[in-house]
Image: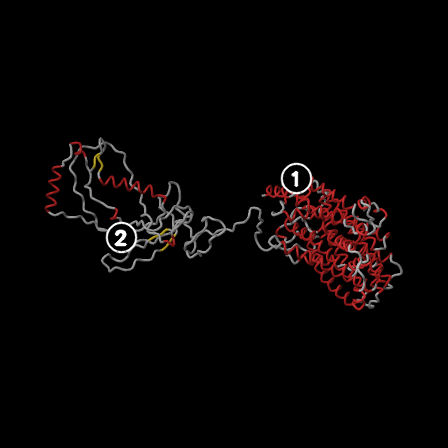
Amino acid sequence: METGPGGERHSDDELATALEEEVARITMAIPVVAVEPSPVPAVEPVPSQPERSQSQSESSQSEPAPEDEEWVGPPTQAISFEDLPVRRRMEGPQPTFSAWVGAAAPQPPAPETPVSPPPAPEPPAPEPPAPARVPVAPAPTRAEPLSYVVPELAPRDSQPVPLITEEPPTAPRDAPAEPAPPIVPVIAMAPVLPPLPGTGPVVTHHLGPIDAPSDHIDTDLHDDADDVRGTAPTPRSSPRVAVDETVLLGAEPVAAPLFEPEEADLEPTPIDRRVGRAARMFWLWFAGTSSLISLGVGATLFTLGLSLRQLLVATLVGVALSFLPLGLGTLAGKWSGQPTMVVSRATFGVRGNVIPTVLALITKLFWGSVLLWLAGSAAGSLAVSGGWAQGRATPTAVALLVAILVAGVIAFYGYALVARVQLVLTVASALLIAVLVAATWRHVDLARALAVPDALWTHVVTGAVLVFSYLGLAWAMSSAEVARYQRPGSSGGAAMLWATFGAAVPPFVLVSYGGLLAASHPGLAEQLASDPVAGFVRLGLPGWYPVPLLLAVGLSLISALVLTMYSAGFTLDALGVRIGRRWSTVAAGGPIALAGIVLALTVTDLDSVVRGVPTALSVPVAAWTGLFGAETMLRVRRFHQPSLLVSGGVYPDWRWLNLGMLVAASVIGLGLVSSDLPWLAWEGYLFRLLGIDPQAGIGASNIGVIVALALGLLTPLVAGSRAVRRQEQGAA
């Protein structure tokens, strides 16, 4: 018994009880599992006679003061923590608190063992009543704290705490020693507390087997929030994704039905509809650029005075230049999933892009009408040459009507039907081209073609510009439309290569072959340049060939017309018409049909069409291509799609530097080109100021297209990188 100065007297039993209550309160948050300890018989030590006499003498010498006589209570006994049934070992990793603790698992009942009652204490002598004390409630029954935790199951921060229970011994204490039972991990919630008033029983949950795999460890972040090891059921980590990454939940994307009109307009295409792979870009472009009209372009190059090797060099350079707008436009369309003239808003401003959009609409309407006219003219020429009709008017009119209706219906339904039709036409066009080359190869005279002397190398520039205008610049403002349905995870570089090869390989082969035929038969060159179909008829083809020839010409022209009308619908919407993609396509088809009829009534020479207006349109288109392509190459992040649709986002309303350079490069370029058409005689004014003849030498090279392209490329590279970085930071 101890007495504090001026305080109350407390026995050792009371102090032990108070200490136990305090330990129970502190360890409430420690998850434990109850262990039924083996009963330990109480053994009371019997002191020897000398010790008993010595104890009595010491008790008589240290007799307490009168106030200590007020104590009334049971006799005290020395205790030690070593006497506890289960010893708490301090070695090894220690458990930590965690919220990842499941409901209590049922435990098997412990075997009952007889416990000998402790000896009854002797009644103490009566003492004066002690001062009133606050009664101390008995400590709630609690389990012993956790036992030793093996290192394999030792928890770390924010991990489920594996609770360890030890099976109570079942053998009698006098039995021979046996190996300790294995440690069984369980999931439980501890300590076991009495139910709150007014609540029902605790509901337990089955957490499944305890042999879950332990290898689901994430390595993408430097944390251990879900790096769980062990054999207990554990939470599994979820994959991390980038902030701006779109996650596709569920199965693979599904292609839209063929005869269901496409709903996507200027907004990004739905992720679950992006089924295109990079290889698809090849056949989307192959059929549209495999027209036999390319043979006429090759013959036109020969009429410029180029030798065969100069013709091949000019064709190769023009095709290589076409890689720039077609490849970068494909990449931009894959990044954003939006049409070309919507993505162009990042370069010229949300409102300022109206100027390039008007230019794009004029370009597409022009080339659409040319394609329609070529289809009607080819049908009329073949009908007259084959003796199927007396005049050209009726077959030409029928061909114009069929071409515009078929192309309009396919473009109206949208991408799904366009992609399927392009695949079929690609296979058909490849077979028809092979048949064409096989049927006309006997007319090739390689020795005569190689004997043609070289012309001035400035004419090579003219030929390269012509091929570039006919191929790359004609499709530059339509290149993103067919790339909008590429899978987000597909390779952008692969899509660029497939698109450029699909669009460039057929023209390269056909233009080169047309030049070879023209060089082999110089007297036939003019006919092939002005009317390729009539020129083929003059070669003396077999009687069965007019039908394959008509299919080869008509199918490829309809394929190109489909792509033109499909793209023109988006361009009309980008101007603010917003009547929906389907009806915008119909609205764009009206001017194309009207212009095609006008060309059919007034123009009979392909050479004048190819060398006149296309060059004038190519100058501003080349300037736009340079500005748009350079900024696309500078970007390291994808476009912020919502800001391309409304003002006030990441992209400003006006990009004055790029707009100014678009106008300036166009003005300079038009001063460095020339045309034979009377109403375009004002072109080449810069040559006249410099005293150069616009119709000879460098003046006839149309180098203004290359100058406009170069000025457009240099402007963002020199002065536009900071603006691009600001846009990307605003979108981050």
Q: Of the numbered discs in the image, which one, if any, rests on residue 38?
A: 2
Location of residue 36 in the rendering, given as x and y in whole percent from the top left corner: 30, 51
x and y percentages locating residue 227 in the rendered image: 45, 51
The amino acid at mark 1 is Pro
Does residue 424 appear in this view? Answer: yes
Locate residue 73: give its quadrant: top left
Q: Residue furthest top?
A: 6
Find numbered disc 2 in the image and state the secondary structure of the residue it sits on: loop
Answer left or right for 19 relative to 238.
left
| Measured Cα–Cα span from mark 1 to mark 2 | 81 Å
For residue 627, side relative to residue 196 (left or right): right
Q: Which numbered dot is residue 459?
A: none
How is the structure coloured here? secondary structure
Query: What amino acid type is highlighted by mark number 2?
Result: Ser
Name the residue carrying label 1.
652
Can you give x and y, in whole percent of width and height, for residue 146 in the image?
Answer: 33, 49
| Front position in the image: 416 or 386 | 386
Q: How many marks?
A: 2
- CB under 8 Å between callouts 1 and 2? no
Where is residue 220 drawn, in percent x and y?
Answer: 50, 51
